[in-house]
Amino acid sequence: MDADILEQDAGHRPDGGAKRRQIMDGARSAFLAAGFDGASMNDIARSAGVSKGTLYAYFSSKDDLFDAIIRGEFAQAAERVCAFRREGDVRAMLTDFGIRLIGRMTEPSVLALARVVVAAVEKFPKIGRAFYESGPLLGATRLAGELVALEKAGALRVPDPQRAAWQFIDLCQSTVYKRILFGVVDRVAPEEIEAAVVAAVDVFLRAYGA
């Protein structure tokens, strides 16, 4: 039977969702332990506690499985991180968004996935695209839409909302994200994140404030 047909059938079985989650959880552990290149489908099946046949019934390749993990990981957080604050002024909205975003980016589980992607992207560019589209691009696109609304309300002047969104996200990461991503520090305190974001908002509003 064709792998695509098997996967479609798997999604419609009563236990399809639970089994798929079981496989993804096991695969996630295998990828974090051995890296994307180092984890074989045999390793993933063993980690997930399923047969190799069952694994292929749900995912046709290791690339597809990692893609699903990445997109699932970010889909769960997208609504929480991009639920923009409606009360208060533009400074309060940007500060709230920035703190939640950097808090999410510095969570150990997200950092671990980012490191796997960075290590594998040269040989497996597909997983880099999945990570970029589901995480950074999604966040910047949603923020850009919010910046457009704020400009229409007279709170900002933003000639290029997409560029401005990326600039704001990059400003929020300064002094925080790269240090923890590359293991210079083990953790960043909430106070450090807040300070970085407050400084980012100050710079951003000097550039784009109405």
Image (cartoon, grey):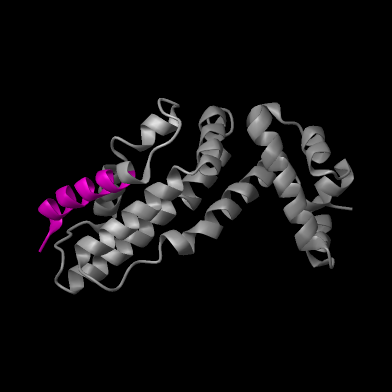
Of residues 103 and 146, the one nearer the viewer is: 103
Query: If the image is split into quadrants, where does the C terminus sit?
Result: bottom left
Horizontal and vertical percent for residue 142? Answer: 37, 61
Q: Is residue 130 visible?
A: yes
In the picture, residue 205 is in which quadrant?
bottom left
Of residues 174 and 14, the one nearer the viewer is: 174
Location of residue 178 with respect to 97 vertically, above or below: above
Q: How many numbered discs, if any?
A: 0
Location of residue 206 with respect to 17 vertically, above or below: above
Q: Which residues are magenta?
A: 193-210
Horizontal and vertical percent for residue 94? Answer: 27, 59
Tell whether position 56 is magenta: no
Horizontal and vertical percent for residue 40? Answer: 76, 31
Location of residue 4 with respect to 30 vertically, above or below: below
In the picture, residue 29 is in which quadrant?
top right
Q: Is residue 59 visible?
A: no
Image side of residue 152 versus residue 109, left or right? left
Of residues 193 and 68, the one nearer the viewer is: 193
Tell whether position 195 is magenta: yes
Residue at (18% x, 74% y) in the render: 153
Image side of residue 90 versus residue 50, left or right? left
Horizontal and vertical percent for residue 133? Answer: 48, 50
Residue at (14% x, 62% y) in the render: 157
Secondary structure mostly taken by the magenta-highlighted segment of the chain: helix
Residue at (14% x, 71% y) in the render: 154
